[in-house]
Image (cartoon, rainbow, N blue to C red):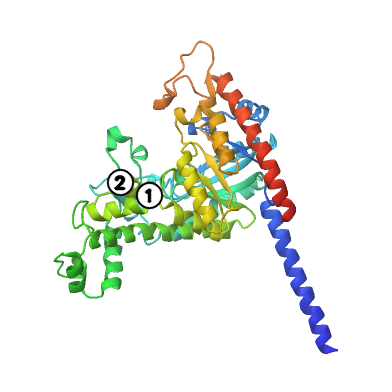
Amino acid sequence: MKLKILLIMALAIVTSFAFAQDKDEAKKMEKFPPYYACMTEPHAWFYGPLEESKKRFAIYKENGVDMIRVELAWGVLEPEEGKWDVKHMMDYIKLAGEMDLKSKVILGVAMDPPNWFFEKHPDALQMDEVGNVSHFSMSYSFPELNKVVDEKNKQIISFLKEAGVWDYVIYLIPSFGPAGEPAYPHPWTMGGEEVYGAPKYWGYEPSAQKDFAKQMKTKYEDISTANKTWDTDFKTWEDVIILKPGEKPGTYWNDYLLWYRDRKRDFVKFEIENVMKNAPDKISLVYVPGTGFSQADWDDAVATAQGPWVVKMMCDSMDLMTTAIKSGAWLQYTGCENEPEVARLRKYLDDNGMADAVMWGENAGYYVCAKHPIELANIIIRNRLYGLDYTHAHFAFMPKEGTKMPDLDNWDFTGMEPGNVEPNPTIMGDLKTAIGMIREQNNKIFASKNETK
């Protein structure tokens, strides 16, 4: 009799747990939320007057858009230590939500630390091979990195809840570095190639140099073993430094690249899990950079102690996708106009047991990539992507009559200020068609998945 009672109790507990899990899943995912079209506005627009935002939101709705992507940049929200200014951005999200536009929210901590933070923690600055530093990322070797990111992620999430806009948020996007992507600073985040020059290797800040020596000591134990392997003559582990590109190709350079890669991998894993821990009822959406390196690219970098820019940026797409999916996150590919790379990523997912992985498509933020929305939709459909995140929204607009069309390829915003634009009839019309194509395809695919879940 006692055994029967215990079995009944155990069954009740298991059933209750399963029900709770199902309930959590339903709440978190709804299981595949039917939002397939997102607009990402340029910064000048979402920091602009809300009355102009309302007009644009109405245009988005008329053309089939159901989401906006919002960057909550730490450097903007906390311009002085301890003094937060979040009202405008919370009102922006609220306005969109009240107009039935859901939000993707970028937790922009690691991608936009404020100046006061770097003044207080200069050891958090990431440095390249010639001594340039980035203010749009933090060193992956900064000892307090995880602690700072956790604290600020929690703070931003709390603002969303306190402002009453949490229910409008469907996705939270963890940021890993410049522009949110897990890639080392690209010239465009450093003033452009005209200012910065070609892509460079990073990881030369003091905290990184120290961490590299520590990791190599763990690997080789004795400095003489390392010297023999690398063909170097460091006297002690304290003398070990990260050499400049072109020096000591071969084993040393492979060791450096592995360290360079793994410091970023460690942070990526932490950041994904941190966002999911702090917001278990939201979908974590992970950026996959527009181009990832191949084994041939890696081998070239080892052989030459140089290598192509995709290795310098360490666009580690395959591991990134695997880590994200294993953690329960979704993906967003940030260069979907590049169909060969989309197909390569999709094949990797299909071949490695991740055929059902959900990945949004986002066009690169250039006019040439944005002015043909129907082509973007065809790529998304052919490669089973989830939806289109159109960046940036101003590419689908034009200045009102009397103002010359700016050079959008070169980011000339003259004449494109909020309040001075109207829909470009060709591009906005094609965008509406593209969204309809994607929605029709995905409604069929994901309706069936909802039923099976």
> Visible in this render: residue 89?
no
Answer yes or no: do the residues labelled 2 and 1 have beta carbons within 8 Å? yes
In the displayed structure, does residue 180 sit left or right of residue 225?
right
> Visible in this render: residue 219?
yes
Tag 2 secondary structure: loop
Tag 1 secondary structure: loop
Q: Residue 435's x, y, as percent?
A: 63, 33
The quarter of the displayed image where residue 429 is located: top right
Q: Pointer 1: what residue?
A: 293
Q: Residue 187's x, y, as percent?
A: 33, 39
In this rendered view, identify the residue nearer to me: 314 or 414: 314
Q: What's the amino acid at mark 1? A: Phe
In this rendered view, identify the residue nearer to me: 43 or 47: 43
Q: Residue 262's x, y, as percent?
A: 38, 60
Q: Residue 87's x, y, as percent?
A: 57, 40
Q: Which mark is residue 308?
A: 2
Residue projecting furthest to the top: 402
In the displayed structure, does residue 445 sit left or right of residue 328?
right
In the displayed structure, does residue 453 sit left or right of residue 265?
right
Image quarter (top left, top right, bottom left or bottom right) of the N terminus = bottom right
- Residue name at image x 54 percent, y 15 percent: 400
